[in-house]
Image: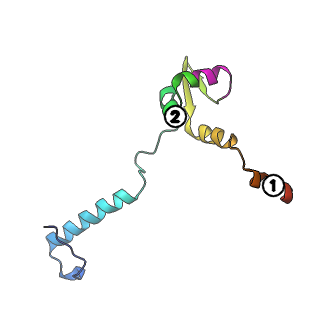
């Protein structure tokens, strides 16, 4: 049976109960916070980039040859920056008709 401490004031807890509550709160907090200790790496291999973009590796090689995607080549190996891929994806975003009309009326 799991002990809940919500009905009792903190000062009435025993040391063991307090430590159990503290440990439980730390576990809950760790689940809520983003993973700061292991941030996603920015430099991706072609396999990682293919997974990230949900494309095949062959498609990425074709896009590289046609200079349709930004990449880095070091000692014959191909790498992609995650941040640059995000920007590249944003640059290809298609606008809706209502967005285009709004831009025309606002003179953007």
Q: Is residue 33 above or below residue 22?
A: above
Q: Are marks 1 and 2 in contact (CB under 8 Å)?
A: no
Q: Magenta segment, principal secondary structure?
A: helix
Examine the structure image and report whether residue 95 is included in the region drawn in magenta. no
The answer to whether residue 94 is above or below residue 17 is above
The span shown in magenta is 61-68
**Does residue 11 appear left or right of residue 47 in this picture?**
left
Residue 11's label in the rendered image is: none
Front residue of 13/103: it is 103
Write the residue at 67% across / 27% down. 68
Question: Please, what secondary structure does the residue beneath circle 1 have?
Answer: helix
Q: Nearer the viewer, residue 79 or 90?
A: 90
Residue 25, percent from left and from top: 29, 65
Q: Which residue is mark 1?
A: 101
Vertical order, 60 against 34 (above or below): above
Occupied quadrant, residue 102: bottom right
x and y, in percent, of residue 74 in the image:
56, 21
Q: Nearer the viewer, mark 1 or mark 2?
A: 1
Measured as percent of width and height from the top left, residue 44 is found at: 51, 32
Rate crowding at label 1 as few (under 14), some (14 to 19) or many (20 or more) other CA atoms within 10 Å.
few
At numbered mark 2, what does the secondary structure look like: helix, strand or loop?
A: loop
Q: Nearer the viewer, residue 106 or 36?
A: 106
Placement of the N terminus among the 4 image quadrants: bottom left
Q: Any mark on residue 54, and which?
A: 2
102 horizontally vs 51: left or right:
right
């Amino acid at each position: 049976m799991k002990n809940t401490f919500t009905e009792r004031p903190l000062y009435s807890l025993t040391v063991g109960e307090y430590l159990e509550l503290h440990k439980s709160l730390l576990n809950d907090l760790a689940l809520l916070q983003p993973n700061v200790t292991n941030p996603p790496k920015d430099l991706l291999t072609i396999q990682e980039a293919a997974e990230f973009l949900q494309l095949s590796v062959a498609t990425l090689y074709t896009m590289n040859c046609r200079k349709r995607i930004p990449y880095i080549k070091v000692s014959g190996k191909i790498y992609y920056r995650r941040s640059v891929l995000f920007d590249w994806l944003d640059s290809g975003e298609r606008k809706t008709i209502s967005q285009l009309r709004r831009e025309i009326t606002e003179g953007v």
